[in-house]
Amino acid sequence: AYYLVHSMEPAAAGGFRERDAEGARAFGEAALAEGVLRVIYLGGLGDDQGELSEHLESRHETGRILAEAGPPLLEFRAAMVVSADSASFTMLTDLVNRLPAMIVPRWVDTPSQPIAVDDVLSYLVAGLETPLDGPRTIVEIGGPDVTTYRRMIQTVAAERHRHPLIVGVPLLSPRLSSY
Protein backbone atom coordinates (compact mmCIF):
# COMPACT_ATOMS: atom_id res chain seq x y z
CA ALA A 1 0.00 0.00 0.00
CA TYR A 2 1.22 3.50 -0.79
CA TYR A 3 0.97 6.37 1.68
CA LEU A 4 1.24 9.72 -0.09
CA VAL A 5 -0.61 11.96 2.35
CA HIS A 6 0.77 15.34 3.46
CA SER A 7 -1.16 18.13 5.11
CA MET A 8 0.00 21.64 5.88
CA GLU A 9 -2.99 23.84 6.62
CA PRO A 10 -4.11 24.41 10.19
CA ALA A 11 -7.59 23.20 11.13
CA ALA A 12 -10.05 23.61 13.98
CA ALA A 13 -9.22 20.07 15.14
CA GLY A 14 -5.47 20.73 15.45
CA GLY A 15 -2.58 21.58 13.21
CA PHE A 16 -1.17 19.60 10.31
CA ARG A 17 1.30 17.74 12.51
CA GLU A 18 -1.46 16.22 14.66
CA ARG A 19 -3.51 15.31 11.58
CA ASP A 20 -0.48 13.72 9.90
CA ALA A 21 0.20 11.61 13.01
CA GLU A 22 -3.42 10.54 13.38
CA GLY A 23 -3.70 9.64 9.70
CA ALA A 24 -0.44 7.65 9.71
CA ARG A 25 -1.47 5.68 12.80
CA ALA A 26 -4.90 4.84 11.38
CA PHE A 27 -3.45 3.86 8.00
CA GLY A 28 -0.69 1.71 9.52
CA GLU A 29 -3.13 -0.13 11.78
CA ALA A 30 -5.60 -0.70 8.94
CA ALA A 31 -2.84 -1.94 6.61
CA LEU A 32 -1.61 -4.38 9.27
CA ALA A 33 -5.15 -5.63 9.96
CA GLU A 34 -5.72 -6.23 6.23
CA GLY A 35 -2.51 -8.22 5.78
CA VAL A 36 -0.62 -5.65 3.68
CA LEU A 37 2.98 -6.85 3.30
CA ARG A 38 4.62 -3.43 3.03
CA VAL A 39 3.81 0.25 3.03
CA ILE A 40 5.65 2.61 0.72
CA TYR A 41 5.70 6.20 1.97
CA LEU A 42 6.93 9.34 0.23
CA GLY A 43 8.33 11.62 2.93
CA GLY A 44 10.62 14.62 3.08
CA LEU A 45 14.37 14.72 2.60
CA GLY A 46 16.28 15.94 5.64
CA ASP A 47 18.81 14.80 8.22
CA ASP A 48 17.22 13.49 11.44
CA GLN A 49 20.22 14.83 13.36
CA GLY A 50 19.98 18.30 11.86
CA GLU A 51 17.67 21.21 12.50
CA LEU A 52 14.43 20.44 10.66
CA SER A 53 11.48 22.67 9.95
CA GLU A 54 8.16 21.75 11.56
CA HIS A 55 7.07 20.57 8.10
CA LEU A 56 10.01 18.14 7.74
CA GLU A 57 9.79 16.99 11.37
CA SER A 58 6.18 16.05 10.68
CA ARG A 59 7.16 14.09 7.56
CA HIS A 60 9.77 12.12 9.52
CA GLU A 61 7.36 11.55 12.40
CA THR A 62 4.81 10.22 9.93
CA GLY A 63 7.37 7.65 8.77
CA ARG A 64 8.12 6.60 12.36
CA ILE A 65 4.42 6.19 13.14
CA LEU A 66 3.72 4.21 9.97
CA ALA A 67 6.58 1.83 10.83
CA GLU A 68 5.46 1.43 14.45
CA ALA A 69 1.76 0.95 13.73
CA GLY A 70 1.84 -1.00 10.49
CA PRO A 71 3.62 -3.46 8.24
CA PRO A 72 7.29 -3.03 7.23
CA LEU A 73 7.84 0.42 5.76
CA LEU A 74 9.86 1.60 2.78
CA GLU A 75 10.25 5.35 3.24
CA PHE A 76 11.45 7.33 0.26
CA ARG A 77 12.64 10.80 1.28
CA ALA A 78 12.54 13.45 -1.43
CA ALA A 79 13.01 17.19 -1.67
CA MET A 80 10.71 19.27 -3.87
CA VAL A 81 8.95 17.21 -6.53
CA VAL A 82 8.98 19.17 -9.78
CA SER A 83 5.55 18.82 -11.33
CA ALA A 84 2.68 21.08 -12.32
CA ASP A 85 0.65 19.37 -9.57
CA SER A 86 3.28 19.67 -6.82
CA ALA A 87 2.14 22.08 -4.09
CA SER A 88 5.72 23.21 -3.41
CA PHE A 89 6.52 23.78 -7.07
CA THR A 90 3.19 25.54 -7.66
CA MET A 91 3.88 27.84 -4.71
CA LEU A 92 7.31 28.69 -6.12
CA THR A 93 5.92 29.47 -9.58
CA ASP A 94 3.05 31.50 -8.08
CA LEU A 95 5.57 33.63 -6.18
CA VAL A 96 7.52 34.27 -9.38
CA ASN A 97 4.38 35.06 -11.38
CA ARG A 98 2.87 37.43 -8.83
CA LEU A 99 5.62 39.22 -6.94
CA PRO A 100 8.05 41.85 -8.22
CA ALA A 101 9.94 41.57 -4.91
CA MET A 102 10.21 38.89 -2.23
CA ILE A 103 11.36 38.96 1.37
CA VAL A 104 12.62 35.45 2.04
CA PRO A 105 13.99 33.62 5.10
CA ARG A 106 17.53 32.25 5.17
CA TRP A 107 16.45 28.69 4.36
CA VAL A 108 16.03 29.71 0.69
CA ASP A 109 19.82 29.32 0.48
CA THR A 110 19.81 25.77 1.86
CA PRO A 111 21.07 23.19 -0.68
CA SER A 112 18.33 20.96 -2.08
CA GLN A 113 17.95 18.23 -4.69
CA PRO A 114 14.61 18.72 -6.46
CA ILE A 115 13.41 15.64 -8.29
CA ALA A 116 11.18 15.26 -11.36
CA VAL A 117 7.81 13.63 -10.79
CA ASP A 118 8.59 10.92 -13.38
CA ASP A 119 11.68 9.95 -11.38
CA VAL A 120 9.63 9.79 -8.17
CA LEU A 121 7.10 7.55 -9.88
CA SER A 122 9.92 5.24 -11.03
CA TYR A 123 11.16 4.96 -7.44
CA LEU A 124 7.65 4.27 -6.15
CA VAL A 125 7.17 1.43 -8.64
CA ALA A 126 10.65 0.02 -7.92
CA GLY A 127 9.75 0.13 -4.22
CA LEU A 128 7.53 -2.90 -4.73
CA GLU A 129 10.67 -5.01 -5.24
CA THR A 130 13.20 -3.10 -3.10
CA PRO A 131 14.63 -5.31 -0.32
CA LEU A 132 13.79 -4.04 3.17
CA ASP A 133 16.29 -3.71 6.04
CA GLY A 134 13.79 -4.36 8.82
CA PRO A 135 10.64 -2.64 10.01
CA ARG A 136 11.69 0.73 8.47
CA THR A 137 13.93 1.18 5.46
CA ILE A 138 14.76 4.77 4.50
CA VAL A 139 15.96 5.60 0.98
CA GLU A 140 16.87 9.19 0.14
CA ILE A 141 16.06 10.16 -3.42
CA GLY A 142 16.89 13.34 -5.28
CA GLY A 143 17.49 14.68 -8.71
CA PRO A 144 20.97 14.95 -10.22
CA ASP A 145 21.42 18.65 -9.41
CA VAL A 146 22.03 20.29 -6.06
CA THR A 147 20.62 23.81 -5.97
CA THR A 148 18.92 26.23 -3.60
CA TYR A 149 15.36 27.52 -3.47
CA ARG A 150 16.75 30.97 -4.33
CA ARG A 151 18.33 29.53 -7.49
CA MET A 152 15.09 27.69 -8.37
CA ILE A 153 13.16 30.97 -8.02
CA GLN A 154 15.73 32.73 -10.23
CA THR A 155 15.61 29.94 -12.84
CA VAL A 156 11.81 29.92 -13.07
CA ALA A 157 11.81 33.73 -13.17
CA ALA A 158 14.34 33.80 -16.02
CA GLU A 159 12.27 31.29 -18.01
CA ARG A 160 9.26 33.58 -17.59
CA HIS A 161 11.25 36.73 -18.37
CA ARG A 162 10.73 38.07 -14.85
CA HIS A 163 13.33 39.51 -12.52
CA PRO A 164 11.99 39.69 -8.97
CA LEU A 165 14.07 41.35 -6.31
CA ILE A 166 14.89 38.71 -3.67
CA VAL A 167 15.78 40.08 -0.24
CA GLY A 168 16.97 37.60 2.36
CA VAL A 169 16.36 38.12 6.07
CA PRO A 170 17.91 36.08 8.90
CA LEU A 171 14.59 34.86 10.28
CA LEU A 172 11.34 33.25 9.22
CA SER A 173 8.61 35.85 9.38
CA PRO A 174 5.44 34.95 7.46
CA ARG A 175 3.97 38.35 8.29
CA LEU A 176 7.00 40.22 6.94
CA SER A 177 7.10 37.97 3.87
CA SER A 178 3.37 38.53 3.27
CA TYR A 179 3.99 42.25 2.79
Image (cartoon, grey):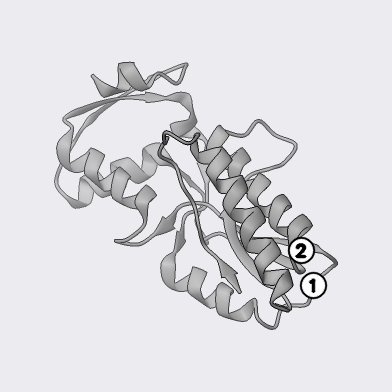
Residue found at x 61% / y 63%: 41
Q: Would you identify the image quadrant in which residue 178 lies? A: top left
Q: Give how far across and how far down residue 69 sits, in percent.
A: 75, 58
Q: Is residue 61 left or right of residue 12?
A: right
Residue found at x 43% / y 73%: 118
Q: Is residue 98 left or right of residue 153?
A: left
In the rendered image, which quarter contains the N terminus?
Answer: bottom right
Residue annotated with mark 1: 132
Residue found at x 62% / y 39%: 57
Number of marks in the rendered image: 2
Q: Give how far across and how far down residue 151 sits, in percent.
A: 38, 41
Q: Give how far across and how far down residue 53 sits, in percent.
A: 56, 33
**Position above or below: 84 against 105:** below
Q: Would you identify the image quadrant in which residue 18 lies? A: top right
Q: Is residue 45 left or right of residue 97?
A: right
- How far is the residue under mark 2 from the one under mark 1? 6 Å
Check if mark 2's residue and mark 1's residue have beta carbons within 8 Å: yes
Q: Is residue 45 visible?
A: no
Residue found at x 50% / y 68%: 120
What's under tag 2, amino acid-wise? Thr
What secondary structure is marked by label 2?
strand
What's under tag 1, amino acid-wise? Leu
Q: Is residue 103 visible?
A: yes
Q: Residues within 10 Å of mark 2 (few under 14, many from 20)?
A: some
Residue annotated with mark 2: 137
What secondary structure is marked by label 1?
loop
Image disc number at residue 28: none
Front residue of this view, candidates 148 and 140: 140
Q: Give how far across and how far down residue 123 sits, in percent.
A: 57, 73
Q: Residues within 10 Å of mark 1 (few under 14, many from 20)?
A: some
